[in-house]
């Protein structure tokens, strides 16, 4: 007889600890909103941010409802179209000047998850508002080892003037624990991996590095005992999980050993892959593992800082992204912006596909998640913050109906969406930032 095990079971050895994915031996999956009950699949939320807006004519579907045609920028998501919806006319009002003058890039990122007007300063007196991810982390974070995970491909700057008198913290940090406490991103895959799965003392870390042994090697003895008490499906799932972790470790090690690729626009720190796409995809895999193991249920993921002038020579786009976003309706520049947009959407597709491939209870990891993809700018040339490009993927335990283009009234607060998502995390929050109520129509 297979003994029922707790969802909190971890494998331990030599100072390392690995959380486990959901297994059949942990019991049945229950209702979407009950995240406190044992052995029920919890909802997760992640916010994926891209800078400088989108070429909106190739993003927004022309038809509403389920029968819309995918625009060119969303074509990489064709196989996933039933797993997400496009939400049109959501607005980040607090990213607008509202009397503060220039600085739309800084405000775009700072207001995106907060719905709060950032104080215009490049000094230490920064002020914005608590972000939706941190509200969720405060409510459900005690149930996981990490209350939240903040990751990205560009570092978070904590000082300096980056945009028309706004501190660099605003344009490089999306998560805020409080109005005065920004949450810097982790960008180094090795550091993220160690934060998720290390739990080692310094002596154990040195010992592991010296012997060049994987974290998994430290827990194999414990895993062997566990596997003897599992059914065939759980043993297969555990083997797949170990293989995924080992693959990421090996890719991180390879990335650290490869020579740097010289680039004039971005100096990557040590152990970060030189190839941008590989960097994004390793971070995607780590985010999937963090959700799969229930190490955290809340994350933010910034593909590039707001105002990023990264070039994309591997796409034959050698101009900087920010420079191109000021396209002045030049068709050649707009085409290059669309190429960058499509590349980013392709990486989103990789993340969603990975989440969808993992079975959990009566669905998939994606079915028990809410993944938002978007930007705090709409058209980069206009620097407008209404009609934002917003994609919502995942069903949040069957509480969201996907596969649609939903067009809301103009200037509907983006924070109404955040409030509706918090409901599905059982947060008990009645207002956030400039919210005016819940977003209607998500459940059909």
Image (cartoon, rainbow, N blue to C red):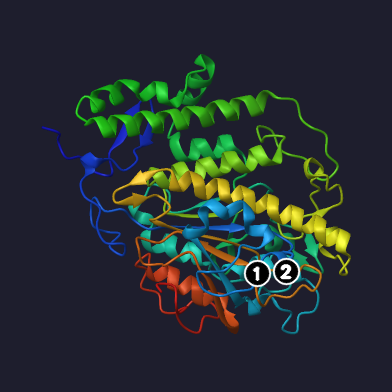
- The residue tagged 2 is 57
Residue, x 61% and y 71% (percent of image)? Answer: 128
- The residue tagged 1 is 60
Q: Quadrant of residue 59?
A: bottom right
Residue, x 47% and y 59% (percent of image)? Answer: 82
Residue 288 vs residue 362, the one in the foreground: 362
Quadrant location of the C terminus in the rendered image:
bottom left
Q: Quadrant of residue 307?
A: bottom right
Residue 56 vs residue 150, the one in the foreground: 56
- Residue sitting farthest toward the top: 211
Crowd band around label 2 with a 10 angstrom C-alpha radius: few (<14), some (14–19), many (20+) = some
Residue 84 vs residue 300, the one in the foreground: 84
Can you give x and y, in whole percent of width and height, for residue 239 in the image?
Answer: 36, 28
Left or right: where 95 falls relative to 129: right
Q: Are marks 1 and 2 in contact (CB under 8 Å)?
A: yes
Can you give x and y, in whole percent of width and height, for residue 215 in the image?
Answer: 44, 26
Crowd band around label 1 with a 10 angstrom C-alpha radius: few (<14), some (14–19), many (20+) = many
Can you give x and y, in whole percent of width and height, for residue 173 in the image?
Answer: 64, 58
Residue, x 40% and y 33% (percent of image)? Answer: 241
């Amino acid at each position: 007889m297979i003994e029922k095990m707790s969802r909190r079971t971890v494998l331990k050895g030599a100072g390392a600890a690995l959380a486990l994915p959901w297994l059949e031996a942990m019991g049945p999956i229950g209702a979407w909103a009950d995240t406190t009950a044992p052995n029920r699949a919890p909802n997760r939320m992640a916010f994926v941010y891209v800078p400088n807006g989108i070429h909106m004519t190739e993003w927004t579907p022309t038809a509403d409802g389920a029968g819309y045609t995918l625009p060119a920028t969303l074509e990489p998501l064709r196989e996933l179209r039933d797993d997400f919806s496009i939400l049109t006319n959501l607005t980040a009002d607090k990213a607008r000047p509202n009397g503060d003058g220039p600085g739309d890039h800084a405000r775009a990122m700072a207001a995106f998850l907060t719905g709060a007007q950032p104080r215009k300063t490049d000094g230490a007196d920064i002020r914005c508002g608590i972000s939706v991810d941190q509200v969720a982390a405060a409510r459900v974070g005690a149930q996981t080892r990490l209350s939240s995970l903040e990751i990205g491909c560009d570092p978070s700057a904590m000082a300096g003037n980056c945009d028309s008198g706004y501190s660099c913290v605003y344009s490089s940090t999306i998560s805020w624990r409080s109005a005065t406490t920004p949450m810097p991103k982790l960008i180094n895959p090795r550091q993220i991996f160690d934060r998720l799965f290390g739990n080692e003392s310094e002596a154990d870390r040195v010992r592991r590095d010296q012997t060049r042994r994987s974290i998994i090697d430290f827990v194999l003895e414990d895993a062997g005992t566990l596997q003897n008490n599992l059914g065939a499906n759980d043993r297969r799932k555990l083997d797949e999980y170990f293989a995924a972790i080992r693959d990421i470790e090996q890719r991180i090690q390879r990335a650290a050993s490869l020579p740097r690729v010289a680039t004039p626009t971005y100096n990557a720190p040590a152990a970060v892959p030189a190839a941008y796409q590989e960097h994004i995809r390793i971070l995607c895999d780590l985010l999937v593992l963090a959700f799969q193991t229930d190490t955290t249920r809340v994350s933010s993921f910034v593909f590039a800082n707001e105002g990023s002038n990264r070039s994309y020579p591997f796409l034959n786009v050698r101009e900087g992204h920010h420079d191109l976003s000021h396209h002045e309706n030049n068709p050649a520049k707009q085409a290059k912006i669309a190429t960058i947009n499509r590349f980013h959407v392709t990486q989103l597709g990789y993340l969603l596909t990975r989440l969808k491939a993992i079975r959990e209870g009566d669905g998939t990891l994606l079915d028990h998640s809410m993944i938002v993809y978007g930007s705090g700018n709409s058209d980069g040339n206009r620097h407008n913050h209404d009609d934002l490009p917003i994609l919502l993927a995942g069903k949040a335990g069957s509480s969201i109906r996907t596969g649609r283009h939903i067009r809301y009234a103009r200037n509907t607060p983006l924070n109404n969406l955040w409030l509706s998502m918090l409901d599905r995390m059982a947060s008990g929050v009645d207002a956030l930032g400039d919210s005016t109520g819940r977003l209607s129509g998500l459940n059909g």
